[in-house]
Image (cartoon, rainbow, N blue to C red):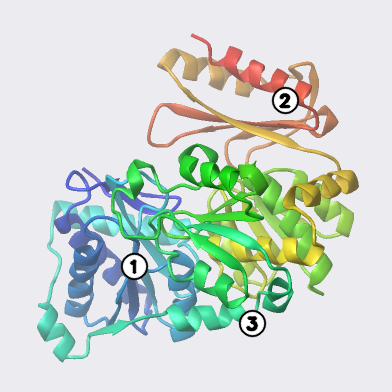
Amino acid sequence: MEIKFGTSGWRDIIADGFTFQNVRICTQAIADHLSATGKTGGVIVGSDTRFLSTMFMETAAKVLAANGIKAFLCVRDTPTPVISFEILRRKTAGALNFTASHNPPEYQGLKFSPDWGGPALPETTSDIESRANHLMREGSPQSMELAEATKKGLIEKIDPMDGYLSDLRSKIRLDTIKGSGLKILVNPMYGTSRGYLDRILKEAGCNVTVINDNLDPYFGFQPPEPSESHIPDMISRMKSDCFDLGLATDGDADRFGILGPKGRFFEPNQILGMLLDHLKTTRSWSGGVARSVATTHLIDAVARHHGIQIFETPVGFKFIGDLIAHDKILMGGEESAGMTMKGHVPEKDGILACLLVAEMVAAQKKPIGTILDDLYKKVGKYITRRLNFRLTPQQKQKTLETLRESPKEIAGLRVGNTVKIDGTKFLLDNDAWILLRFSGTEPVVRFYAEARTQEDLDKLCAYGENLFAS
């Protein structure tokens, strides 16, 4: 096998590809990368709540220690954005984070974040990947016993919670939330936001009820992803009780899921549009806004309304994080429920997003559905859908031929520009568009479509279904 880093690190099935020996190899590759690039200052080692996470953390720390690199070992499961914050606070060389984020419980992952705090850019992951696969073929990782490493000061246990929460208090307008009396249902989905999101909301005087806040490496037998299909218990609870908001985070708390009264689910794309409008209205910030190529053009409409620049990036939050790190944008977001903002970590933060939604609802003194309706009245309505199609070799070939031909019309809508920064995106009449992205690991194409009307969206999705019909 080979170790391969995707958009968010290396992920594999526990005890299949994700083994202790492969963790040692990957950590040694990271240590060699840091040595080659002259990075110093130690490395944060953290994890989410997945099976064997603590042991994987200790395994990595022992390899780092054997290479003379101090490991700051988190004492409990830690949200990904908190690890990012701690990199910047301590000025370390980076962090190793054992997380498979929203993936099913049989998966584990290792994510490396460099010293600037965001997800590693391709040139970094390519170097680590190459070193790891060379070690797989020849060579062996170093390791030092935990007791010896601790005695030598090469392992130090830390809890980064208080520093991160203190920073959040300075960025969220808690006084606005305090006067609202919001009744909120919080769902950490058995993940790392336990004691983070609920604690801040309680401090702000909200009436908070928490579900799924115990440790469970099976995540209640659902992938820890706060999409509508994976939070049926939360939706049911919202329907039966009079909550103003439901706020959920995924396994490592870098993604968000938002429910309104009676369990209405709001798409991440809708939340991103509302939050951009809220931040631009309530903060005197300069800078543009970034979104991935697969993310709603509702963001573009809000940006045009406020006269700010739009940055379109490939899929992968590292590209948005890089813009945050260089202070070019006031907010960045992606359709898979990731966002961050100016002055915050260059990493997606589900805790931050949930708190900003609470602040927005409190500030406007309106239900979140009314806020969305008001935004649509200002900038227009956008409806988005994503479909996944499994392909035979013949279907893939047919699709590639269609893309090479650059069609003049799709579903009755004229094709304008074509964007190829990640997949192939056709910009169409009436502000509609479609995007086709092939998976790099399985025979799947992801088909994204957006339109201003349900009729146009249905036509685009029918076009996709016909394109991939057998």
- Residue at 65% x, 21% y is 461
Q: Which residue is mark 1?
A: 77
Q: Position of residue 28 (x, y in %)?
A: 22, 66
- The answer to whether one can see residue 349 in this image is no
Q: Is residue 396 left or right of residue 172?
A: left
- Residue at 22% x, 63% y is 56
- Residue at 16% x, 84% y is 149
Q: Is residue 74 left or right of residue 395?
A: left
For the residue pair 189 and 294, the one nearer the viewer reads as 189
Q: Which residue is mark 2?
A: 457
Q: Secondary structure at mark 1?
A: loop
Q: Secondary structure at mark 3?
A: loop
Which residue is outermost to the top? 470
Q: CA distance from mark 2 to mark 1?
A: 41 Å
For the residue pair 189 and 149, the one nearer the viewer reads as 189
Q: Position of residue 301 (x, y in %)?
A: 82, 47
Q: CA distance from mark 3 to mark 1?
A: 24 Å
